[in-house]
Amino acid sequence: MSGPEDRAGRHRKRMQARKEIVDAGVARALQERGVVVLYTGDGKGKTTAAVGTATRALGYGYRVVVAQFIKGAWECGEKNLLGRLPPEQYPLQWYEMGTDFTWETQDFEADKAAARALWDRALAALRDDSVYLVVLDELTYALNYHWLNKGEVLDALAQRPPEQSVVMTGRGAKQYLRDAADTVTEMRALKHAFNDGVAARKGVEW
C-alpha cells in the first residue's frame, strides 16, 4: 500500500506533466488580437456568459457596447446593476430592440424594423476602434428570422477593428456564424425547471 510520500510524488509528477502541456499552449499563443466568441445551443446560460464577459471587460475600464435582439420588453437584472455604475469609470452602452419576443409580437415588419435600428447602433460600435467589446445578444434570432442581412453581419465582423472582440449569443447558430467565430461554446440542455412546470425565477432567469 502506498503512503503519503508516494501519493505526493505521483501528484507532483502528474502536475508537472500538466504544467508542461499548459506552458506549451501558452508559448504557441503568439497572436494579439480581438476574438469573436459564440455561445449557442438550447441550454441556459448564453446571455449570462456574454454579460459576464462584458462585466469582465468593464472591470478593466474598457468600453463595452451591448445590443440585445429579441429582448427589451422585460426587466433585466444585469442591466439594472451595470446601469448604476459610473460611466466615466465603467463605459457601458446598453441597447435593446425594445419589442417583446417575436412569438408575442407576431409582426414581422415591425420586428425587422426594430432589429434594423438596433443593428445600426451595433454596426457603429463594430466600426469604432475605441470600443473594446461588442455583445450581440440573441443575434441568431435576428439572422434566422431574416431581419438582418447575413452578408452584412459577416462583413462587419470581418472588418471590425483588430483589437475589438465580439460576443454573439442565441440558439440555432448556423454554420456560417460558427465559422466566423474564433471560439464556439454550445450549451446543451440536460434539464430545466421550466419543463417541469416551475415558473421562471426573477434574479435567476432574468
Image (spheres, grey):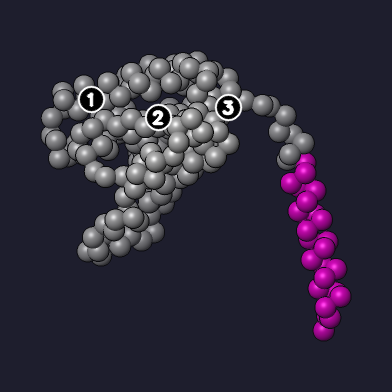
- Residue bearing mark 1: 114
Count of residue discs: 3
Give the prevailing secondary structure in the magenta stretch.
Answer: helix
What are the residue bounds of the magenta stretch?
1-24
Upstream in sequence: badge 3 or badge 2: 3
Could you tell me how far apart the alpha carbons at marks 3 and 2 are, in whole angstroms? 19 Å
Q: According to the image, label 3 marks what residue?
A: 34
- Residue 31, x across and y down, in percent: 68, 27
Q: Which of 198 and 183 is in front in this view?
A: 198
User: 97 or 103: which is nearer to us?
Assistant: 97
Instruction: Choose between 111 and 98: the one closer to the eye.
Output: 98
As for residue 59 lying within the magenta part, the answer is no
Crowdedness of circle 3 by 10 Å Cα count: few (<14), some, many (20+)? Answer: some
Q: Which amino acid does label 3 sit on?
A: Gly
Q: In the visual, does 104 lie left or right of 44?
A: left
Q: Residue at x 23, y 60 (%)?
A: 199
The quarter holding residue 201 reads bottom left
Dot placed on the residue nearer the N-terminal end, 3 or 1: 3
Q: Is residue 4 magenta?
A: yes
Q: Which of marks 1 and 2 is nearer the N terminus?
A: 2
**Residue type at tag 2:** Gln
> In the image shown, does 205 or 28 lie closer to the viewer?
205
Rendered residue at 16%/23% (across/down): 109
